[in-house]
Image: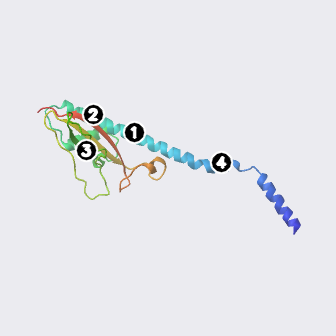
Amino acid sequence: MTRFKSIKGAWLRRWLKDEAGTATIEFAIMFPVYIVIFFSAVELGMVQYRQSMLERGLDMAVRDIRLGTGTAPQHDDIKQAICDYAGVLPNCTNNLRLEMIRVDPRNYVAPSNVADCVDHSETSNPVRSFVNGDENDSMLLRACLVFRPVFPTAGMGLQLAKDGAGNAAMTASSAFVQEPR
């Protein structure tokens, strides 16, 4: 019996001193970290790309409004212009919601920080807060786009605030003066 213990003890000592497979342990520990960083980098890149395209589309549409003096901008026309100028926003016409808010420059009251976004988990999504201003009114146009994260269950995609349908939101805003008709 003592001989069995000594054989078992020698094997255990050899096993503990053996350094084969240490790279596998480091890989097993670090691989999930690198995968999360990779997923987060891809997600961040897509979010930044969509955000810049949304801002570009909104700026170009507001430029058209500024140059189209004497016409009252209509919701559907502005929405379509934003989607056309942005180009790459997924399902833009169904995922974009616009708010037009009259802003008094002499008695400024900041609009709500919470944007009115589409929530696909709701049964109805009516257009809210879209009022064409009177002549010479300062108007704030805010666009909210909802999108499905590329990796919704990993990295940055997991940390994004999501609605009931699992979509995250991004906003862009621009201001203009309603020209006289």
Q: Earlier in the sequence, mark 1 or mark 4?
A: 4
Q: Could you tell me if the residues under marks 1 and 4 are in contact, i.e. CB atoms within 8 Å? A: no
SS category of the residue bearing label 2: helix
Q: Is residue 28 visible?
A: yes
- Mark 3 and mark 2: Cα distance apart in space: 15 Å
What residue do we see at 38% from left, 52% from top?
162
- Mark 1 and mark 4: Cα distance apart in space: 34 Å
Which mark identifies residue 26?
A: 4
Identify the image quadrant of the C terminus.
Answer: top left
Of discs 3 and 1, which sits in the foreground?
3
Query: Depth check: 160 or 32 in front?
Result: 160
| 76 over 174 or under it: above or below | below
> What type is the residue that disc 1 sits on?
Tyr
What residue do we see at 42% from left, 42% from top?
46
Of discs 1 and 4, which sits in the foreground?
4
Q: Earlier in the sequence, mark 3 or mark 2?
A: 2
SS category of the residue bearing label 4: helix
Which mark identifies residue 49?
A: 1
Category of crowding for the residue at label 3, using alpha-carbon neighbours closer than 10 angstroms: few (below 14), some (14–19), many (at least 20):
many
| 173 over 169 or under it: above or below | above
SS category of the residue bearing label 1: helix
Figure coloring: rainbow
Q: Is residue 151 visible?
A: no
- Residue, disc 3: 98
- Mark 2 and mark 4: Cα distance apart in space: 51 Å
- Mark 4 and mark 3: Cα distance apart in space: 50 Å
| 40 over 121 or under it: above or below | above
